[in-house]
Image (cartoon, rainbow, N blue to C red):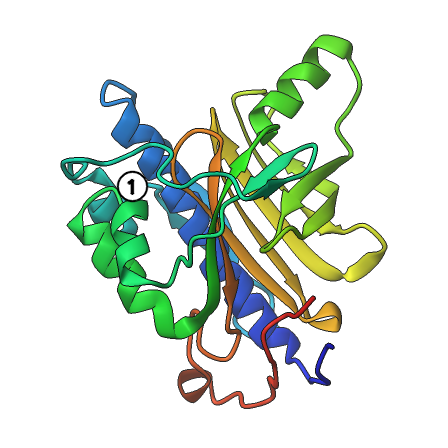
Amino acid sequence: MKSSQTFSWNRFLVILTFVLLTGLALVGVLVLASRPSALPLPPLAHALPTATNASPKIIVTSLTNSAAVATAMAANQPGFQVRPFPVAYESLQVQWTLADGKDTNVIRQLAHNPLEYARMVEENPRIFRRQLVYLKAPAAAVFERAKLTGEPVQQLTLPGVDGQELQFEIVKRDGNGSSRQGMFSGHLAGNVDSLVTLAFQDGREAFTILSPKENIFLVGEPREDGQVIVKAIDPNTYGVGSEETGDDSIKSQPTTK
């Protein structure tokens, strides 16, 4: 049962900006880590909201200048497994594992290296759930098929936790329509009050789904090609804490099915 809640629009944008930049950094980092000879990725411009009635401040950030870079660029730890957990259940497009991604023993298998392990453990108090999913149809594959058929991609299926699937309606596209990489934004199908962002490069992708009305706050971060670590985040603490923003208007509980 979904709880009642109020949600500040300015807070919404702050969280969106934080998780989008984090996700984009992770996409770029993991691509670089798996392809050492790749050229440095160019900086990207993002709008950082300063206030709901103010013009967005444009900042330029690089996919290779965040703290996430250090954790993912470190060498894989001995015994790292590409598919550490078996599939528990699946749909036509997604396979979910059941391992509790907040358990430190599970995190050791999820993380590529000790730095990434430490980052996930530190993040634990700010999330409700972390779950590894395998994608049968990564965004890159969907766009590659669309390129061959000439049919535009207007919706994508994104995984939630524990078997949940969400339909992402694409409104804006950044880039030239390449099937190798892209950045997209929009909303959940039938819910224009939600915000969804997706970035992918080759087989890796990251996304953000924020829907206060449905009490859905999800972040997907890349692990390996065709894999996403889906996190149900606590909007009270993820990103900039309420004590830092002076915003105590969010009242939220974990999403339940």
- Relative side of 108 to 87, left or right: left
Q: Is residue 52 above or below residue 223?
A: below
Q: Quadrant of residue 29?
A: top left
- Relative side of 134 to 170, left or right: left
Residue 53 position in % (x across, y down): 65, 75
- Relative side of 30 to 129, left or right: left
Q: Secondary structure at mark 1?
A: loop
- Relative side of 103 to 186, left or right: left
| Residue drawn 68% across the image and 58% down it | 195
Residue under pointer 1: 64
Asked whether 79 or 142 is in front, the reply is 79
Which residue in the rendered view is the most extreme toward the right?
Answer: 190
**Alpha-carbon neighbours of circle 1 within 10 Å: few (<14), some, or many (≥20)?**
many
Asked whether 67 or 48 is in front, the reply is 67
Residue 97 position in % (x across, y down): 49, 46
| Residue drawn 73% across the image and 85% down it | 4
On-image quarter of the N terminus: bottom right
Asked whether 102 or 252 is in front, the reply is 102
Indicate the amino acid at tag 1. Answer: Thr
Residue 142 position in % (x across, y down): 65, 24
The answer to whether residue 24 is visible is: yes
Residue 226 position in % (x across, y down): 49, 31
